[in-house]
Each structure stands twice: as C-alpha cells, then as structure tokens.
Image: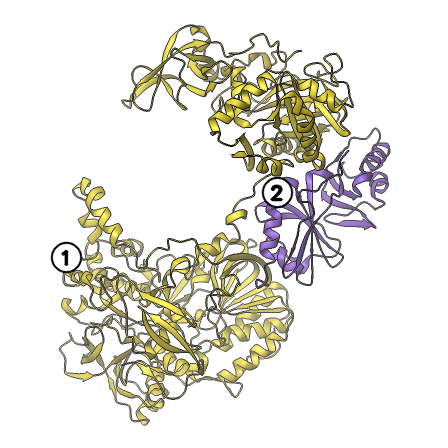
Amino acid sequence: MSDPVSALGGATFEGFASVREIGPLGMITLRAKAGTAGLEAAVHAATGCALPAQRRIVRQGDRAAGWMSPDEFLLILPYGDVAAALAGIAQALQGQHHLAVDVSDARAVFRIEGAKADQVLRKLSPVDFDRLEPGELRRSRAAQVAAAFWAEDGGFTLVCFRSVAAYVMGLLSTSAQPGSEL
Amino acid sequence: MSTRLKSGGRLIDRSAPVEFTFNGKRLRGCAGDTLASALLANDQMLVGRSFKYHRPRGIVASGAEEPNALVNLGQGPRLEPNQRTTTTELFDGLEARSQNHWPSLEFDIGVVNNYAARFLPGGFYYKTFIHPRAAWKHFFEPIIRQSAGLGSAPKDRDADRYEQAYAFCDLLIVGGGIAGLQAALVAGRAGARVWLVEQTAHWGGRAPVDGDVIDGLPAADWVERSVAALMAMDNVTLRLRCMAAGSYDHGYVLLDEKIADHTPGDGRPKHRLWRMRTGKILAATGAIERPLSFAGNDIPGVMLAGAVRDYVVNWAVSPGDRTVVVTNNDDAYRTAIALHEAGLEVAAVIDARAAANGALPSRARALGIRVETGRAIAKVKGGKRVEGVEICLQAGEGSASSSLPCDAVAMSGGWSPVVHLWSHCGGKLIWDEEQAMFRPDPARPPLHQDGSAMVMAAGAANGALRDALADAHAQVNIALQALGFAAASSDAPAHTVPDEAPLEPVWVMPQGASVALRSKMWLDYQNDVKVSDVQLAAREGYESVEHTKRYTTLGMATDQGKLSNINGLAVLADSLNTAIPQVGTTTFRPPYTPVPLGALAGEARGEIFQPLRKTPMHGWHERNGAYFEPVGHWRRPYCFQRAGETVHQAVEREVKNTRQALGFLDASTLGKIIVKGPDAGRFLDMLYTGVMSTLPVGKCRYGLMCNEQGFLSDDGVVARIDEDTWLCHTTSGGADRIHAWMEDWLQCEWWDWQVFTANVTEQYAQVAVVGPNARKVLERLGGMDVSREALPFMAWRDGTLGGFPCRIYRISFSGELSYEIAVPASHGAAFWEALHKAGAEFGAMPYGTEALHIMRAEKGFIMIGDETDGTVIPQDLGLDWAISKKKADYLGKRGQERSFLANPDRWKLVGFETLDGSVIEDGAYIPDHGMNPNNQRKVQGRVTSTYHSPTLGRGIALGLLRQGPQRMGEVVEFTKRDGGTTKARVVETVFFDKDGEKQNV
C-alpha cells in the first residue's frame, strides 16, 4: 500500500507569517448526545483527553478532542491510530446510540505561524481574535468555505475540507503577502 | 491667479518636490500636497467640465465634499475615473486627466449645451425622451450613453490588489478632528476597545486651521499631544486614510482604508475594506460648509470660504491675489483674516446680514478689511475664471450698486453637520432653526438590536459647531456608560474659540433675484442643477423632495449632494411656501464616498475568485489532457483529449472503449452520507420514495428523494453497512444540500428520532471501473474475490485491492460490468495510477462526464438536473417501480396525490429516435396544434437529454411527452433553431442492452 498523501503534499508559503499544510492527520467525527453513558470514556480512549466543554479543544500530546456542536466532537490523533481508536470508541459506547467515523482523509490541515499569524486569519474569518481564548475552537469560515481553527504552539491550526485545500492555501498565502500586514 | 505662497503651509514639505502631470502638462508640487492644492499652486483653476452644460469647473472645496474637481487618475491597468483631486494625495509621477470634454478642456464642443440651457430645463430627460417610443432605443439612448458618465471606464485588468479584514471593537469613533480625538482619549482611558478612524491623512480636522486654543495650547499642539497619548494606549487603534462608508444593523460598519493610493505599485494592497462589528459608533464626522446661491457661483475661482482658508494655511496656496468673501455668518471672517495674515488682499467681506459686530468681524475691521453688511453678490463676472463681482442689496432684486474686481470669491452659507452614519440606519434629524441646519435628533437615534442607541453624534456632526470638544466629551461618556464602562471623572479640556453672532439663513442671493439671475445660481455643480430648476420642479407639482431629486437630478452625482442637498431643499421649501423640516431630506445611503469595486471584491479574484473543489486525482487529470467542466463547485473532466483529437472525438473514443474494453471514471465527487441509529431505517423510509429499512446488509438499492411538494430532488444508490448503518450516495452537486436536508428534518421535525448523520463525501476517492474487462483488472490487482458469486450485482464488500483498503460497490450507471471502488482519499491518486498500470493490458482508458452521460442515456437512466428541473415527479419519469406503494408516508407522497400531479395527461418520459439519425437540438420542444392565450404555439413536450450515441451510431434522446408511454411508435416533430423541425419516433427509454445482460455477468 502507498503512503497516505495529504491534499497539497505539504505545501508551504513564507510571507509575513508562514503557512504550511500539515498532515495527513488522524481525525474522527464522534456524534453522541451529552450524557450518553460511556461518552467520556470513549473520548478518553481515543485521545486521552477529557470531554471538551462548549467551544473548547482539549489537548494531550499529539491528540486532542474538540467540541464541534452539542452532539458532535472532533477527535485528533496520529493517522495510523484511527482504526484502533474507532475500536476503542465502539467498545466504550457499546449499546449506546452514537456515530464514529474516520474523516482523516476528508480534511486538509494548515499551520499558520509567526508573530503576526493572527493577521492572516483576521482577513478571512469574521472572528474576534482579540477575544479568542487559549484552547478555544472556532467553527467559522475562511472567505467562502467552512473552516475550524484554534490557537496552539505560537500559531494557529486550521482545518478545512480536502477538496478546497488549494483554495484555502491560496487564501492564506494571499493574506500573508508581505506588505499587507494589518 | 492662484499661486504658491512664499512661506507657510503646515502640511507641505517644500524640501521634497513632487512631479506630476495634468493633461500631459508637467507640473510640480510638494510632498504633503493634495492634487487639488498642487493644481492651484500651478494656477490650474480650470480642472473640468460639468456634466450637462459642460460649464468650466474649478476647485470648490478642500475635502470629500468636492463636486467639481474630478479627474481620470493614472492610466491603463491603474486608471481610476472620477477621482476627487481634493482627497488625492500627490505622489511623484501622478498622471491626471480632466474629464467630460471634447476635444480639450480649454475648448469644449459640448459647451453649446450651455447656450441651449433654456432647452435643457429640469426634467428635460423625462419630457424629451418619452415620444416617439421607438426613438428611445435607436436614437436617444445611444446618444445619452455616449455622453453619460464623467470619467472614462477602465478597460484593463486592475493591476492592484485589494483585501478585506474583520475587526471588532467596543467603540468606533469616526473622524479624527478634535472631537474624535477627545472622545478617543476618554474612551481609551476608560479601558474600552477603541478604533479611531480619519478619512484624510492628517489628524486634527479644522481646528488647527481655525486657530482654536485647547488646554492653553494651539490646536495643532494639542492634537499632536493627544495622538501621542492615544498611540501609547494598547486598547486604541488609530487609522488614517480610513473612511467609514456606512453603518448597518447590529453595529456593523464598513470602512475603506486607502493603503497605497499615494504609493502606487509599492506592493501593498491599494485599499483594505474593514468589516467591523462595533458596540457603539461615535460619529465625530464634522460639518460641511454650504455654498451660497448667487449668479455665477460656479465660475472657477468661486470657492468655499473654509476651503480657501485650508489652502492658505495647510498648503500655502492662495486662490487669488484679491479675494471677495461673501457670507451670512461670522465664521467666514476667519478666511478674510487668514488671507490678510498671509499678505493677500481681501477686496471686501460682503455680509448678507444687516449687521456684523461679533468678535471675528470686529477683528477683521480692526485689520483694515472692508466689511459691507446687508449686501449681496448680484453676479460673478468671468468665464473660465473669476474676474470680479457686482454688489447689490441682499434685500433687493439684484441691481448692482458697484462692482469689485477680484480673482477669487470665498463663500459661506453656514455649515451642515455630516449626519450620514447617523442616518444610514434610521437615525432621525431635527431642523435647528437658530443654526439653520439639520442635526441628529438625540431622541430618535438609530437603534441597536436591544433598542439602545447604536450611533452617537459628537461635535460639529452633532450640531455643536463651536463647542465640539465639550459635546464630544459628553457624548462619549453616554456611549461609555451604555457599554458598561465608567464615564470620565474629569471635565473636557478648556476650548477657547471666539464668540460668534448667529447666522442668517440665505438660500437665494439676493433674496428677490430675477429669473435671469436664478438661472445662473448653481445648486448641484456636477449635475448642473440650478435654483431655477428646483423652482420649476415645484411649479410642476414635485412636492416630495425625493421626487424633486430624481426629476432635477439634484444630488444624484458622484458627490451625492454633499454641497447641494440642503440648499436645494431649502429652495424647494421656499417655492412650496412651506417650512424646511416639512420638506425633509432625501435618504442618506452608504457609501459616504465611493468605494472601489476592487475593495468590495477583496481577495476574491483570479485563482481564488471562487473555491474550486478538486478530487485527489485532479492533478493526474490536469497532466493527462482533461477538458474540465464545472459540476457544482467541482471541476470534473468532461473528457480526456489526446493529441490531435477534438472534444467530440475524445468523447466518442471514451464511450466505445468503455463499452468494448475498460474505462475508469473519477467518481469521487459523488455525495456519501452515513446515516446511523436505531431509527435510521425509518428515517430513510421517509426520505426516499422506496423502502430502505428492508435492505439486507451487504446490499445496494437505488433510491429517489423528493421534496415536500413531491418533485424529484436527488437520487443515488444506498448501501446497508450494518444493522443500524446505511451509506447514502447523492448526486455530485447534491451532497451538501442533501446532508443539510437530512439534518433539517432530524433537528426540526423528528428531533426525537435516534439518528446521526455524517457527510463523508471527501473521505473517499471513488473510481468507477467499467467495461467487459473490469473484473480482469481487479483480479490483476488482487486482494479480494470480485467474482459474480462473491460480489453479485447490487452488492458491496470491504477488502483490499493491490494493497489498498477499499470498499467495492457492484453498481452500474452505464449498463456495463461495473465496480465502484472507494479508497481513502489520501490513497486516491496512488490507487488511480495503480489501476491504470494494471489496466493497460486490458485497454484501459479514463473517461469523463460526457461519456458517462451518453452511456447512461443509452441505458435510459435519468440524470437529476437533465430529466428533472424542479417540476418533475418520479412518476413522470416512469420510476413508479422505485416508489413504495406499501408505505404509509414518505416526503412528497402527499404532494404527488394532488390533482395536477396525478393527472394522466402529464408529460412523461420516453425515448426518441430521429428518423434521419441526426441529433435533436438541446432544449428542443415538441410543438402542438394551436396557440395558447398569449398567442404562442402550444407545446406537448420537450427533449431532456440528447446525444449522438457512438454505440448505436445515431442520435438518441430522452424527453417528456404528453401521455408519452401510450404513444409508442408515433412520429413527432422537434423544433430547430433555424425554424425547421426534426422528426423522431417515440420509443422506449432503453436504447441499448434492453435486458441488462452486460452489467450482470
């Protein structure tokens, strides 16, 4: 079998902030209503993280759990560990109404880094970055497409759909053009 | 003549000369000049021609309100028409050309309109172009189009880039004059998140020019100190060259920031459009001076008094050696004093009031300036520039008592607050009798979603022309309290300005002016609307100010009536014998000044104009001759062209090869939605017309989805994954819509059903492996049993192929032996290449969407969007077999029972074979006998899909025909674009392999 290839093969751009496509990253969409028995155990089994509160993302090493909606969570983990994590979730939520699917390949992931990384996103997303708290996950848009992002490690991690990866890369590099600092 | 003074000029740097051209003439200015001040410094008084009469036009103002001095700026890919010279900062190499004249600015043929002015009265367009009707299209419209518009439209692609950015703040303060600065200081100290924006390149507004003293400091020093203090505050953002274009509901504001207008080509974005969400908006937008309406008030050299003062003090430019100041207020005396102090001659101050004894007139008299009260200008003498004025009594009819030679006239009719941001979102105005101005009515502000005031006006914008600082201090405290911040404990700084006597409203000068004089009194300089035009409109019954505006075109030019509106409606009120507040104002609409379309488009141009969705194999397609077509936001290969091949030839080859050997289709765009839960089966039974709950695990079933009205909305194959999980395929363009449709029903109607959905469309790359050799290539890849027994038609299995984890659906949209194989998208490109490698010996070729369409049409399979258009129900398409008769309900069932949809006369799907083998034209109709009530030919059907079938070697078509299935064998006629018809026989919808033997091997 071939090695998994991310949408843009790790494209990068250096402007007043640096942009790079990362991944492939393991991702699971977990849908379950709050209070479902075993939900916390399932999230913990897959990521080692506690159940995230509303609009939060919790991280443990290279794994994270994000709150996407009242009955949806985004679990992030190494690409190769997804199958095992899905098995762990199935076990923890056995007999409980839930849905867990591998969406690793459906996504493209970017890192925007540098002291002015926030300015790149301020041009694309109607989000108040002054008030974006550490550990806050925002589901918003980047110009014309859906995007989710959060701040970590001195930059931002942005997730979008795989098919529009080139569009988002175009947006991020255009916004990071030197001379266009806000 | 206008010229540069030897000394002074607070905004210019004489040591930094700047070269520019005007109509090709090389001129010099200084860094810090505006284009207007630089033109005046070069004695360029004549800068353009008016729109209708082509009258000579000079610079009137010094800011955003300028109606006259508009130019074509730059050229080629940087050409911008209608640029105001007064707000254009001068830069080295600037190229400006004047507008609306032919052949030249000095000699303009169009000026004959001026002499024909009595044939071009208000409402001229309406009166003239009504009859005869035919003349409009062939004669009037082409001429009007030719002469319309001032500047020339850019033809090249814009060389600059633009961007947008989002911002949030507690308080947006618009206007960087002393009111705005004071408000920002107070709000900044209170800890609010503050934005202070100023449309010009300088802080301080008018106060430094007018000689205000604040906190014991000259205004300019106080401004400098305040800006430094604000810069030190982390919670305050300062932006120059940033114009608040409009305010909208919920505290939304659009701001246009000019970043590189004055440094073109430096690589920065030209403009940035800020999209801002504010807590409150403080409009400290100042006031605009009004012209006076006297005969010849449009001759170059007649300027606003405040502007004359600006040019002298800010840019050391004198509009003339000898100036007459004409006024109805004390403020204009500042101009007389400034001119005098600059060593220039003030011929006289003509004051319409009976007496002028305030502090400023007294000071002027003490300087030896001649002051004439109770007087007016009867007319200005001159053509392309002012030569003198005739003086008369303001109370009289305009017979001149004396004449004064001069080369400039500085006029002031009082000041009007800039209330645009207040008014954009519904703030109301009151008429201030004493100051003769409309100002914001604090009792009726524009409202926020919580009912509180959204905008506060402050300073001159609030009508506080003299107490701007104190008013801003008070207003910002109101805003801060409303936002939950503590108000300032200290008072506003001491602000010393001379006392001023009240103005006297003067709307026509002299008040009893004859028709001849009133016909030369300009209200709207750009659109050539005069006092006589508004009076004519009133006489003709246009009582509403909005009607008068449109009838006369008053205030409809690019300046949107910043100078003309109040004067115009005052004249209208007078003509109607009513009070000004009864007439009211026209509507204030954004933008305050024009915003470039480029800024509104932002980053959305070129490659990122629109998101293009790409499959994992997109790069391979690009490298292998794909001819793309848009499908939703996807780009899908229509066909793969080989060297020397036309598109049509490529499609024919792909169809034949797939039918005879092996074809690969990138089907990754197909929608894939997982539906899971104890109620999932019941849910799908409601969504689809057929039954999905009974589908065995491991099997596939074709399904149709309808909307509530019963019309066909989407189709696709559903696979049962396990006991409570289904996977629904949707059309390529329909995945997001159908996913949203599912969630809508689950969240809003059946919220208690236990069902979860997930759109996994992009998780998988999907390939249709189609043709007689399909099984051979999969067996060559190896890894799982793909035999007829192990993987029968309409079944699916998980496994591996060539080492790739995959799920294979044994389904066919072509009638051939066909496998649709889903692999994780990250392996899609590699899998696609592996297929091609393994398929080479079996004659594999990729095929595109057109071959897909032809093959499905040969088999009579419908396509959503071809056979359906939102008015077609499944029964129309002969799909009754896919509709469950047993189910109590499904979405659309009730709709389909309505009499019209159940009518046996409906157009139904049949096949058509042309008698001569030709291809029926796309969109062709089948005419019927007789005419409908609109005298149009009746129709009895239409074509929905029409192709040349490479397999059968002739034209085939699907179409809807009234009672079609009952008319097998009948010959009908299809329309052709050339007027003729194509004869075709009604046949069954399946043209090829009617028994389905090929797919089931």
Q: Which residue is mark 2?
A: A164
Q: CA distance from mark 2 to mark 1?
A: 60 Å
Chain letter for mark 1: B
**Residue located 64% across and 69% down the image:** B235
Q: Please say if the residues under marks 2 and 1 sit with CB atoms less than 8 Å apart.
A: no
Amino acid type shown at disc 1: Phe
Chain shown in yellow:
B
Q: Which residue is mark 1?
A: B119
Using the rendered image of the protein, determine whether residue B198 is visible from the camera's viewpoint. Answer: yes
Q: Position of residue B667 (x, y in %)?
A: 62, 28
Q: Would residue B10 be found to the left or right of residue A103 on screen?
A: left
- Badge 2 and badge 1 in a common chain: no
Q: Quadrant of the N terminus of chain B?
A: bottom left
Using the rendered image of the protein, determine whether residue B433 is visible from the camera's viewpoint. Answer: no
Q: Position of residue B845 (x, y in %)?
A: 60, 25
Query: What SS does tag 2 mark?
Result: helix
Between B738 and B749, the residue placed more toward the observer is B738
Above or below B447: residue B358 = below
**Residue located 31% across and 64% down the image:** B580
Chain letter for mark 2: A
Q: Would residue B112 be found to the left or right of residue B442 on screen?
A: left
- Name the quadrant containing residue B485: bottom right
- Name the quadrant containing residue B587: bottom left
